[in-house]
Image (cartoon, helix red, strand yellow):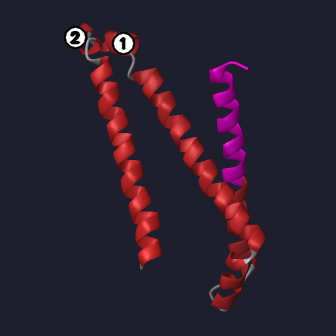
Amino acid sequence: MVMGTSMWYIQRFTSIIILAYVLFMLFSYLAKSYSENPLLWVNDISSMPIKVFTILFVVSLFTHSLLGLKAVEDDYLSKRTLGFVSLYLAQYAQIFRFIYRFFVALVIFVLTYVLIFNYIVS
């Protein structure tokens, strides 16, 4: 299978997992009275199937996001695309791609620290 096609299939598959998780959580919230009984929420979140589904959701969300960001980079930060705007900008396409990748890596690092490491410590 060609690389672009497999990335397209992976992105579609991860979007189905993300949608299923969001709909499940939404319907679960609407169907159960979590505000009246917070222990019900704790019990639901602590169950093994929900933990596995949540891990699958997080991995799918991460994969889906990276593939989307890669598509943005390939589509909008190439020499050809920037050449439509300006031939001067097209000369610096690699620099723009490097800055974009650095920014994406920085955001991933900060979010990972804030959401995971900080959560574990506190």
**In front here: 33 or 118?**
118
**Looking at the picture, how far across and down is residue 60, in whole percent?**
63, 49
Q: Which numbered disc covers residue 10? A: none
Quadrant where the C terminus sits is bottom left
Residue at 61% across, 52% down: 59
Instruction: Single out the residue that lies furthest toward the top.
Output: 87
Q: How many marks?
A: 2
**Residue identifier under label 2:** 88
Tell me the crowding category of disc 2: few under 14, some 14 to 19, or many 20 or more residues within 10 angstroms, Cα based: few
Q: Is residue 33 visible?
A: no
Residue at 27% across, 23% down: 95
Residue 2 in the magenta stretch? The answer is yes
**Looking at the picture, how far across and down is residue 49, in whole percent?**
77, 68
Seen in the picture, residue 92 relative to 105 is either above or below; the reply is above
Q: Amino acid at mark 1?
A: Lys
**Residue identifier under label 1:** 79
Q: Main secondary structure of the magenta part?
A: helix
What range is drawn magenta here? 1-19
Residue at 67% across, 44% down: 14
SS class, disc 1? helix
**Looking at the picture, how far across and down is residue 77, in whole percent?**
38, 22
Residue at 38% across, 43% down: 105
Residue 66 appears left or right of 94 = right
Seen in the picture, residue 33 relative to 75 is either above or below; the reply is below
Quarter location, residue 103: top left
Which is more N-terminal, label 1 or label 2?
1
Tell me the crowding category of disc 1: few under 14, some 14 to 19, or many 20 or more residues within 10 angstroms, Cα based: many
